[in-house]
Image (spheres, helix red, strand yellow):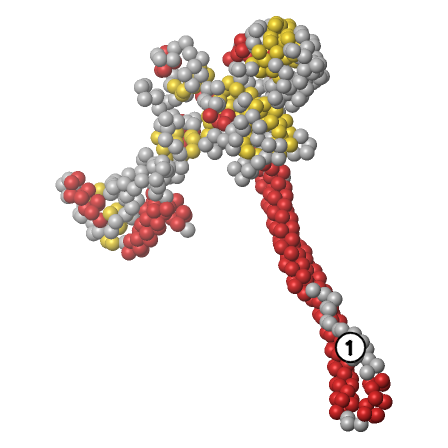
Amino acid sequence: MAEAILGDHNQYSCSICLELLRDPVTIPCGHSYCKNCISECWNKNVQKGVYRCPQCRQTFNSKPPLNKSTVLAEIMEKLRSTELQVSESNLAGPGEVACDFCAGEMIKAVKSCLECRASYCETHVQPHYNVVALKKHKLVKAAVIPVCPKHDKLLEVYCRTDQKCVCMHCLLDDHKGHDTVPSTTERNEKQIKLTDTQTNVKQTIQAKEKELQKMKLDIASNSDSAKKTVENSKKVLSDFIKFIEKRSDEVIEKIKAQEKADLDQGKMLQKKLEEEITELKKREGVLEDLIQTDDNIQFLQSYESVSSSSGSDGFPSRCFKPCCSYPDVNKLVCELKEQLETIFSQEINKTVQKVSDLAVKNNPVGIKFGDRVRVKPSVKTPKYNWGGGITHKSVGVVKDIKSDEILVIDFPGFAGWKGLLSEMELVTDDGSSALSCNIKIGDKVCVKPSVETPKYLWGSVSHKSIGSVISVQGETVTVDFPEQEGWIGEVSEMELVVSADLGSPSHACFKIGNRVSVKSSVKDPRHGWGSVAHSSIGVIKRIQGESLTVDFPEQTDWTGVASEMELINSNVSEVLSLRPGVRVHIKPTINTPTHGWGNITKHSTGVVVAIDGTKVTVNFPEQSDWTGIVSEMEAVT
């Protein structure tokens, strides 16, 4: 209803002030005006007592009465209240564009005209829909129209050279000769790329939502499993306590049964002894009577029968000897208690440790190949001992993980150290990835060969793609690749690309005679391992394009790709330290030399007589001209 009233806004306007009628009055010709407007008009323009209607020009010889229109006044009051409510709801708020043609209140604009360079509200934009000349103007959603600060013209062109929007006059001025295209063309191209990025983001969101859903299920399942384990553990331990109580009752019953047997035996012995005493007292009375008799003949006749037994011969000595020594039983019970406490404590500790080991083993962010690690502070002595001056502060790099949870770690000064996975902990730099300190904006990077699927997916990128870092935020890196701009990845998934890899063959950093090894990040070399391993060190024999031919101790003429190899920086220092005449022995970390022991042992000390690339010839007391590998030897100070 309000919209209907506002739609007829013009018919309720005064033709003199063009505003809504105030104190509306109607003159004889039927037209209505504001009382003050018509009065002032007639006072200024009256000529010879003639009064005219400003609209129809009808004249009146005398000043007509100004009759107030009551109905029209009520309509004006309702119209003003409705307009006030509508205007309040349409006021431009913070950050919104106001209409350039509304006087007084800042009415919110709905459209902006690029030709007029103005913004319009719903009312003032109507001419652009109705007037033929204005229909050709381009209307856009209400916004602040950017203009060239120098020429005050619309920004219609995009300069690819300076990567900024410019006006047509700029093409003849500061941007003359630059690579420029219409803004619409650049917009379309960038929108396609942005759409691809949006698609990747959507795919990432979907993948993350699935990951989140799975994680929620896993967490709930894990929580249920933990609760069941707690309940089961309580039941098992409760049953164990009942078992101990039951066996305790058996021991107590056994002691009581033995006590009863001893008591019965004692009572029987006591009764026999009492009977013997009674019998002896009777004999004593007979003897006393015989001794006191005065008749010699009676005494002599009775003597033989009375004195035939001394009294003790017929009654053997008796004593109470219990079958069980209760102090010994008490001692045994105390010893059992101590043994059970010790065993139970040990087994509980073992169980707790195994639970901790399982937590480490099944940790989704566990130790992996190439991680920096150290021995946990809680480990007093590692299972395979310290060795080589290693301490809790020593930090090494994981070189191998055995199937039986044994880590092979290279510490400074001690390579090939072995330790249990449960004994080690990850070492990070200030709580973040060590690589995050190396990768910075502007660096050339690629996805590590060891990464099968990046955290935020591939998009148009592949392992061969090389891009420039444009942003590093925590563990997230944004890279512009030729295949895809604004690609997002994890810092830990990326590796730096040396300058030799850019604009020139990647073998430019390698020379014949360099000592190299396969990068630790390469899981499977393009041409296979052969007899070579990550720990193998060889010498470059031939370079052909991207292919390197390397002589390893384990395999000669091994073929690899330059991007999969890395230089061994210790080449110069090792060769210099092992020059002819230097006394050497096998490194303690070497279990079996590449060319075998021969007649020497780990304790043998010899003198270097020749060095040929990676091979060294040594004279030992046990064997002359023994051949070994430079990396397996160390100088004896």
Q: Is residue 138 visible?
A: yes
> Where on the picture, by quarter, is residue 589?
top right
Q: Where does label 1 land, which residue?
A: 312
Q: Amino acid at mark 1?
A: Ser
Look at the image and tell me whether residue 575 can be seen. no
**Is 65 displayed left or right of 440 in the figure?**
left
The answer to whether 495 appears left or right of 61 in the picture is right
The answer to which quarter of the image holds residue 18 is: top left
Q: Is residue 379 above or below residue 155?
A: below
Which residue is more in the foreground, 492 or 626? 626
- Pinpoint residue 214: horizontal percent, then vertical percent: 62, 42
Q: Residue at x 57, y 6 (%)?
A: 581
In the picture as drawn, the residue positioned furthest to the left comes out as 48
Q: Position of residue 7 (x, y in %)?
A: 39, 44
Neighbour tally class for label 1: few under 14, some 14-19, many 20 plus, Cα within 10 Å: few
The residue lying at 77 percent from left, 94 percent from top is 294
Q: Is residue 533 above or below residue 430?
A: above
Foreground pick, 398 / 431: 398
